[in-house]
C-alpha cells in the first residue's frame, strides 16, 4: 500500500517544477490541485507567480486542468483569469474528477501527472488513473484534527519515498 501511495516526485514548491523537467520525463498533461498546492485557502485568485508558471507550461505545450475538492465558487474565481478546464468538487481520491479532466485535455495516462499537497487525495487519485504523481508540501497546513491525522498517516509513506529515492540515487 505504501508503494501505491508513494509519489513519483517530490518538490518543495510548485515553482520548482519546470516545463523542462516535465517534458524531460514525458509529461504533457498536468492535473492540478489549487488549495495549499498553488495557493493558500485564503488566496481567492492566482498571483503573478502562478499565472507566469502556468503561462510557461502553456508555452511549451503542456496542458493543464484543475481538479479540486473545493466547491465551484472557489474554483471558478481562481480559474477566471486562467481559463483552463476545471472540475470542482472532484471528490479525490475518486476517479470521476481526474478522469473528466483527462478527457477534457484528450490526455493519456502515460503522459499525465497529478500535482497536489496530499497523499490520500492527490497522489491516490493520480495512481487510480495510471498517471504519475507529484507531491509538494502544503503551503499553509490546516490544524484541525482530521488534517493532523492525515499528516500523521502520511509520514511513513514519505519515509518510504525518501529511502527509495536514496537507493535509486546511489
Image (cartoon, rainbow, N blue to C red):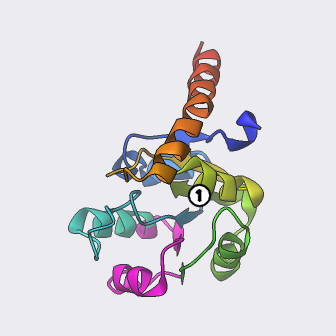
Where residue 153 sits, quadrant-wise, is: top right
- In the image, farthest residue toward the left: 48
The residue that appears at 63% across and 71% down in the rendered structure is 91
Q: Name the side, left or right, on which 130 lies relative to 116.
A: right
Stretch of the chain drawn in magenta: 58-85
Q: Can residue 130 be seen here? A: no
Total numbered badges shown on the rendered structure: 1
**Does the magenta run of residues contain 22?**
no
Q: Residues within 10 Å of mark 1 (few under 14, many from 20)?
A: many
The correct choice, above or below, for 62 with respect to 146 in the image is below
Q: Name the side, left or right, on which 31 lies relative to 50.
A: right
The correct choice, above or below, for 113 with respect to 103 in the image is above
Residue 161 pos. (x, y %): 60, 29
State the residue position of label 1. Answer: 114
Q: Name the side, left or right, on which 153 lies relative to 116.
A: right
Image quadrant occupied by the C terminus? top right
Q: Which of 78 and 15 is in front in this view?
A: 78
Q: Name the side, left or right, on which 40 lies relative to 155.
A: left
Q: Can residue 128 be seen here? A: yes
Q: Is mark 1 on a helix, strand or loop?
A: strand
Residue 12 pos. (x, y %): 38, 40
The correct choice, above or below, for 10 with respect to 66 in the image is above
Amino acid at each position: 500500500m505504501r508503494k501505491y501511495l508513494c509519489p513519483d516526485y517530490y518538490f518543495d514548491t510548485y515553482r520548482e517544477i519546470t516545463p523542462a523537467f516535465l517534458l524531460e520525463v514525458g509529461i504533457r498533461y498536468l492535473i492540478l490541485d489549487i488549495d495549499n498546492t498553488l495557493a493558500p485557502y485564503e488566496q481567492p485568485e492566482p498571483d503573478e507567480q502562478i499565472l507566469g508558471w502556468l503561462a510557461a507550461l502553456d508555452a511549451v505545450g503542456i496542458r493543464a486542468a484543475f481538479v479540486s475538492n473545493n466547491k465551484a465558487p472557489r474554483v471558478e474565481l481562481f480559474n477566471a483569469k486562467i481559463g483552463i478546464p476545471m472540475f470542482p468538487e472532484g471528490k479525490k481520491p475518486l476517479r470521476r474528477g481526474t478522469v473528466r479532466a483527462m478527457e477534457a485535455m484528450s490526455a493519456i495516462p502515460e503522459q499525465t501527472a497529478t500535482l497536489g499537497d496530499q497523499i490520500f487525495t492527490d497522489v491516490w487519485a493520480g495512481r487510480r488513473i495510471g498517471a504519475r504523481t507529484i507531491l509538494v508540501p502544503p503551503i499553509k497546513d490546516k490544524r484541525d484534527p482530521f488534517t493532523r491525522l492525515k499528516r500523521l498517516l502520511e509520514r511513513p509513506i514519505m519515509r518510504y519515498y525518501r529511502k527509495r529515492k536514496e537507493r535509486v540515487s546511489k
